[in-house]
Image: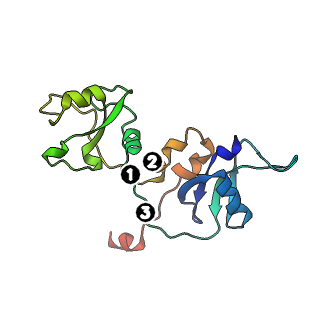
Amino acid sequence: MAIQRRALVLNQNYEPLNVCSVRRAVVLVFRGKAEVLEIGDEPLRGVGAARFDTPSVIRLQHFVRRPMPQPRLTRREIFARDGNHCQYCGRRSDLTLDHVMPRHRGGPHTWENLVAACRSCNHRKGGRTPDEANMTLAKRPRRPSAHPAELFAMHLKRYREWTPFISGWRRKPDRSTAAAS
């Protein structure tokens, strides 16, 4: 159904801002606050036989100032970062979160200390470090980049038309940092 689709919202400078519902995108376009850059596959049905193009990518008419986005530290984001694989055995089912350095031993609840682990590996590791449990991590946990290509990567499989707007965007260097180098 077209109304369940999502739309990519770009700032005036084409920087990807967020993802919204098609309903919200239509409202922004009809109020003149945004323009449609890409159209979705399925049309929206109106009253009677009326049909409207489904916006897939919209660009705001006015620039929105905001700080650089930071990925949220959630289960879903940890699993996405780790490719929905256990970081100890590679299994894809029954995943839980594991603190590499256990919390009761002072391990923080941060990107660098959390990994996806299947229940059996998490249980086997218990309250020990991976070295103490004789287990190896597939890759060292790290904070994901705040680049739009990573922030919106989960949507690219479903919305191929977003690719040029997400992967092609590069933030211009700040004048103060460019002058310093």
Q: Residues within 10 Å of mark 3 (few under 14, many from 20)?
A: few
Going 53% across and 59% down the picture, which residue do you hit? 17
120 left or right, relative to 84:
left
Q: Is residue 28 above or below residue 49?
A: below
Under mark 1, the amino acid is: Ser
Q: Residues within 10 Å of mark 1 (few under 14, many from 20)?
A: few
- In percent of width and height, residue 145 lies at 38, 51
Instruction: Determine which residue is flagged by label 2.
Output: 150
Is there a contact, CB below 8 Å, between mark 3 and mark 2? no
**In the image as oriented, which residue stretches furthest toward the right?**
49
Under mark 3, the amino acid is: Met
Is there a contact, CB below 8 Å, between mark 1 and mark 2? yes
Residue 129 found in image quarter: top left
Q: Secondary structure at mark 2?
A: helix
Instruction: Determine which residue is flagged by label 3.
Output: 68
Sequence-wise first label, 3 or 2? 3
- In percent of width and height, residue 65 lies at 50, 70
